[in-house]
Image: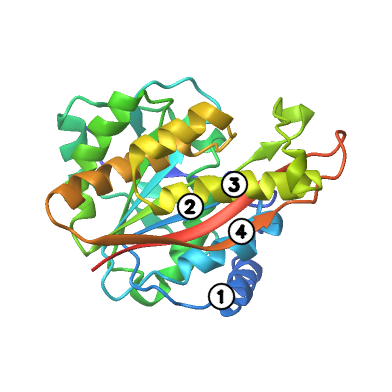
Amino acid sequence: MSNRVVCREASHAGSWYSASGSQLNAQLEGWMSQAQSTIRPARAIIAPHAGYTYCGACAAHAYKQVDPSITRRVFILGPSHHVPLSRCALSTADIYRTPLYDLRIDQKVYADLWKTGLFERISMQTDEDEHSIEMHLPYTAKAMESHKDEFSIVPVLVGALSESKEQEYGKLLSKYLADPTNLFIISSDFCHWGQRFRYTYYDESQGEIYRSIEHLDKMGMSIIEQLDPMSFTNYLKKYRNTICGRHPIGVLLNAVAELRKAGFEMNFSFLNYAQSSQCRNWQDSSVSYAAGALIVH
């Protein structure tokens, strides 16, 4: 057995965000300085995974709620965009590179998860093609920089899970969510609207198309804030809103439901909402972004 350290490169640096550490640091600092820390310390956050020019400012509102002084492990749950996956999967890497500094995968937690038999491994190619986890790495590095040698990450790629699987993974991960030294990052954009996304739901009573999109997203956001997995599933079935991280969100909601049964008191609040552009006609398209945080009382 070789002890070679396996690194996942920052494959989207230079395109989706700056490959220059100093430039990236300055951008993240700028966005973070515009956000308020209103509901720290977050136990979980929901934040977008688009290119930073589109969603960097929005994501800052979630990351501002992270308390690096208590966080020792960061779980990052992102949807799979490129490979069909019906379960959850773990990386084959030891280290995830970022232009700021390298992040270390918690191999002990990985071993515990692997032992359950519920996870598969993704190839390095799939890992580096996927952006849903990577887009949270520079922000994680930035939010945690004051304690950068004191934490590890647990990246989990989430497949197109059935309701019962969302429940199963939620139950499994709930014991980690119960631990105040853990932070969960749930990677999701909201509505992908337009013909290129094959989704053009429009409620004309809301006025312009972009207002209808906002109304639809905010309906979903307020259901997430109720922390009821069933209501969220029903909302998705009814409106088919193209929330790409719906399965990671479903896993979080099920983990929360498990802890609430055990007497934990939790609250989720969304802090920011944005759209990549304002759709006014059928040729337009946009992606929505939302940032929010879960706190445990």
Amino acid type of the residue that numbered disc 2 sits on in the rendered structure: Ser
Measured Cα–Cα span from mark 2 to mark 3: 9 Å
Query: Mark 3: which secondary structure?
Result: helix
Task: State the residue position of label 2.
Answer: 222
Q: Horizontal and vertical percent for residue 221? A: 50, 50
Horizontal arrangement in the rendering, residue 135 relative to residue 182 (left or right): right
Who comes first in sequence, dot 3 or dot 1?
1
Q: Nearer the viewer, mark 3 or mark 4?
A: 3
Measured Cα–Cα span from mark 4 to mark 1: 13 Å
Q: Residues within 10 Å of mark 3 (few under 14, many from 20)?
A: many
Quarter where residue 273 is shown: bottom right
Q: Are marks 2 and 1 in contact (CB under 8 Å)?
A: no
Task: State the residue position of label 1.
Answer: 35
Q: Nearer the viewer, mark 4 or mark 2?
A: 2
Horizontal arrangement in the rendering, residue 41 relative to residue 85 (left or right): left
Task: State the residue position of label 3.
Answer: 217
Residue 123, placed above or below residue 137: above
Who comes first in sequence, dot 4 or dot 2?
2
Q: Are marks 3 and 4 in contact (CB under 8 Å)?
A: yes
Q: Nearer the viewer, mark 3 or mark 1?
A: 3
The residue depicted at 60 percent of the width and 62 percent of the height is 58
Query: Mark 1: which secondary structure?
Result: loop
Amino acid type of the residue that numbered disc 3 sits on in the rendered structure: Asp
- Judging depth in this view, the residue of 69 and 284 nearest the camera is 284
Amino acid type of the residue that numbered disc 4 sits on in the rendered structure: Tyr
Residue 178, placed above or below residue 204: below
Amino acid type of the residue that numbered disc 1 sits on in the rendered structure: Ala
Q: Are marks 3 and 1 in contact (CB under 8 Å)?
A: no
Task: State the residue position of label 4.
Answer: 273
